[in-house]
Image (spheres, grey):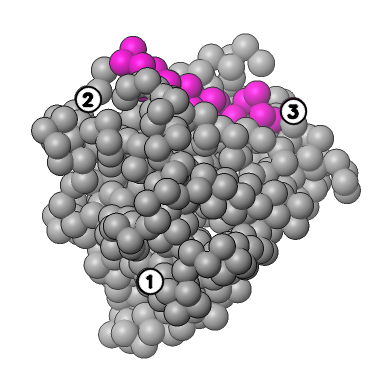
Amino acid sequence: MLLLALVTRRTFESLIGGTLVGCLLTSGFGFFSAFTDSMLSVMKDETVGWITLVVGLFGALIALLVRCGGTLAFGERVGALVRGRTGALLATWFMGLVIFLDDYLSALAVGSSMQRVTDRLRVSREMLAYIVNTTAGPVSVLVPLSTWGFYVAGLLEGVGAAPSGGGLALYGSVIPYVVYGWVAVLVVPLVAAGLLPVFGPMRKAERRARDGEVAPPESPASDVAFGADKAPSNPRLSNFVVPVGVLIGASWVLNDALKGVMVAVALTIVLLLAQRLLSFKEISESFFLGFQSMVYPLGIVVGSFGLRNVNEDLGLTQFVIESVQPIMSGALLPAVTFVTLSLIAFATGSFWGVYAVSLPIIVPLAQSMGVSLPLSIGAVVSAGAFGSNACFYGDATVLSAQASGCNLFAHAWSQLPYAVLAAAVSTSIYVVLGYLL
């Protein structure tokens, strides 16, 4: 799959190719039936259904906010407040820190909000997508009251690391040791302020943007495609702030991004009809145009689930863990855990799945070897955050690229050096902490 991605620079086709090869390994000449059965099981998956509705409705909400001029008003207000390129990038980083409840929510809300601002300042879409992505999953793992925190807390109770009801308390003690999350998030302002030089493919992207071409080839449609050119001449800032505020608040109160975006879409439609900004027909057209814009990223998410399934059939995660167990020592357990699971998460696109498989192994292993339990769990959580941040077809990566209006491969390829840099620093810190603790 990775080879196909590098050669073709196409993500969906590479996922399908990798999945077909996996089915050939598991089923021989019956690979095609195995592939169709796997894809059908993916489409029946409740999680895939949830993602389809959440992402599609987010697309619809974004299209409505663009069409009514809400994003234009927000862009103009933020543009008047921020001072130059550095200010815009730091504002994007800050928004990512604030919207920590869910990585999907963060990626889609921040990317779509800041795209117009960074375009005006000739910031490459790759740079915008990098900051959006790095403040999605890596920030969510640093906050107990997030979808990631709740999920890991439940797993910790399930494996006996914490008593019933005590998972969040244990997760709170783990957060200081989620090293990758801290390092990746702190690298962003260094890049934004120019303290860390722009390097790798990102340098080429920034040069292109300074010449006036902010988006790489084959990027998603701009907001003009959603009717930004038909927006009112005096757009209201409240038509952006109120729906987004309700989106975040409802997602928090209802503890579900799907219910939150449904409430936000319904409120936006009522607001637009009450103000007579759009007719019911125009609202309907914008709604479906926005939903349609998310079909390709949803296809990639479905393809990634298919690859994940075939990797599970091959026993990849269990095989890798069992292969590295003999070389694990107490002091090196956190570092080896982080590196091993990071590679698995990057290759499989399964982050929460890696947690579910590895925590029942790492927790008793750490306890038997006398290694700090919060440190060991932190290494596992960090690995999932790295995978979410770096994987070419991870859901947060896909959504960050889409919301930022950036070609997916261009985003994944340009941000990879920064993710690897943060991972290398994190590995070194885990080695030191392993010996100290």
Residue 322 position within the rendered picture, expressed as x and y whole percent measured from the top left: 52, 47
Residue at (35% x, 37% y) in the render: 117
Separation (CA) of disc 1 from disc 2? 36 Å
Front residue of this view, candidates 376 and 168? 168
Res. 389 in view: no
How many neighbours does mark 2 have within 10 angstroms: few (below 14), some (14-19), or many (20 or more)? some
Q: Which label was assigned to residue 289?
A: 1
Residue position for label 2 = 199
- Amino acid marked by disc 3: Ser
- Contact flag, marks 3 and 1 (Cβ < 8 Å): no
Judged left or right of residue 12, residue 160 is: right
Answer with mark 3 or mark 2, whichever residue precedes in sequence: 3
Q: Position of residue 421 (x, y in %)?
A: 35, 26
Query: Residue 186 magenta-drawn?
Result: yes
Q: Residues within 10 Å of mark 3 (few under 14, many from 20)?
A: some
Q: What kind of element bears circle 3? A: helix
For marks 1 and 2 on the same chain, the one whose residue lies earlier in the sequence: 2
Over which residues does the magenta segment extend? 173-196
* x 56%, y 56%: residue: 353
